[in-house]
Image: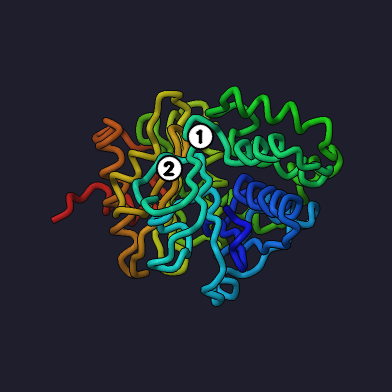
Amino acid sequence: MLEPMPDLLVLTHENPDPDCLASAQGLRVLIRHTLGRVVPVAFSGIIGRSQNRAMVSALGIRTVAAVRALADRSAAILLVDTQPGRRNNVLPSGVVPVAVIDHHPDWGANDGVPFVDLRESFGATSTIVTQYLQELEVPIDARLATALFYGISSETSHFGRETRPPDIVASQFLFPYVDKRLLGAIEAPRLKPSYFRLIADAVQSSVLVGDVLIAVLDAVPYPDAIAELADLFVRLEKANWAVCVAWHRGYLLCSLRSNEPEATAGLLLAELLPSGSAGGHGMVAAGRVAVERKRWERAAGELLRRLLHALGRAGESISPLAGGGRPDSAIARVLDALSTESP
């Protein structure tokens, strides 16, 4: 299918995570091996999380800016770990990719795409790509094996969240080839003081509403920060849900996590935000919506109020995570909006 294409481009979702980066790298290696063609991997946004930056650096994953790569409208696009119609990618309007490879649910915008491989029953897109490499007998070196293994591991929270049998099989296949030293450097990178300040600010700006941990930050240095915080806070002993919201460069960002195996976090957040603005899996979801700086606290309060209502936690008592009195700063204003019905 790809042989007659003049130019090819692998396009990730915005602010790509390890699963997305590893999948894109795997597709690039596959195409180079089978077709002898060098294919760029393009992304938009920021690679901000410490582990993600360490992964790109340690494993030599080369990327280009999507805005520059997409200037050539003749390139055939392979969309990985995202789908047309989602607001988490910069696929140009009216452009139909030649392939969509993803492990998220079908969001119903893949009509006309020549090749669609959606495997919602898989825990990671890296698992799909690993199967491609196995089936086509593509040699996998230590760096690619490490990338794919870490992509699966991080997406499934070290195989403890939404891990499926194919993920285990793929990981077992990859592990003998993994560079354990590089994997350790990626999983536990050195952290800047700003990371600890972010955690401290988030703890001070968090409350428990029943078993729902809510963290609100006035601003974050990079979009992935709220996912990082949600991953941390859902581990709180009393929490079954964690939701983090923040304002970043014109958007209200939201990350949702659950400890409940039967949760439908992705569908839930998709129902609460405008079409195409959210997505995820059962226990993991994220979304964003454009909002003016002066309105973001009101918008955050409305979103959290609707989320608590949908979870059946509306009216539960509110207690600060850090103890003491009611938090000040952004969360106090969001709580005011949270307790006020929309007109």
Q: What element carries label 2?
A: strand
Q: Name the residue under label 1.
A: 234
Judge left or right: residue 317 versus residue 139.
left
119 to 14, vertically: above or below: above
> Where residue 222 is drawn, which disc sits there?
none
Whether label 2 touches label 1, CB < 8 Å: no
Residue at the image point whose x is 79% and y is 52% from the top: 59
Judge left or right: residue 150 versus residue 203.
right
Q: Is residue 330 visible?
A: no
Q: Is mark 1 on a helix, strand or loop?
A: loop
Q: Nearer the viewer, residue 102 or 258?
A: 102
Q: Which of 259 and 108 is in front in this view?
A: 108
67 to 262, vertically: above or below: below
- Residue at the front extreme of this rendering: 4
Q: Distance between the residues labelled 2 and 1?
A: 8 Å
Circle 1 Cα neighbour tier, 10 Å, few/some/many (<14 / 14–19 / ≥20): many
159 to 59, vertically: above or below: above
Circle 2 Cα neighbour tier, 10 Å, few/some/many (<14 / 14–19 / ≥20): many
Judge left or right: residue 93 versus residue 306.
right
Q: Mark 2 points at which residue?
A: 243
Report the amino acid beneath label 2. Val
Report the amino acid beneath label 1. Val
x, y percent for residue 138: 76, 42
Residue at the image point whose x is 46% and y is 55% from the top: 217
Q: Is residue 58 visible?
A: yes
Residue 168 position by quadrant: top right
Q: Which of 16 and 236 is in front in this view?
A: 16
- Residue at the left extreme of this rendering: 343
Residue at the image point whose x is 40% and y is 63% from the top: 251
x, y percent for residue 71: 54, 77
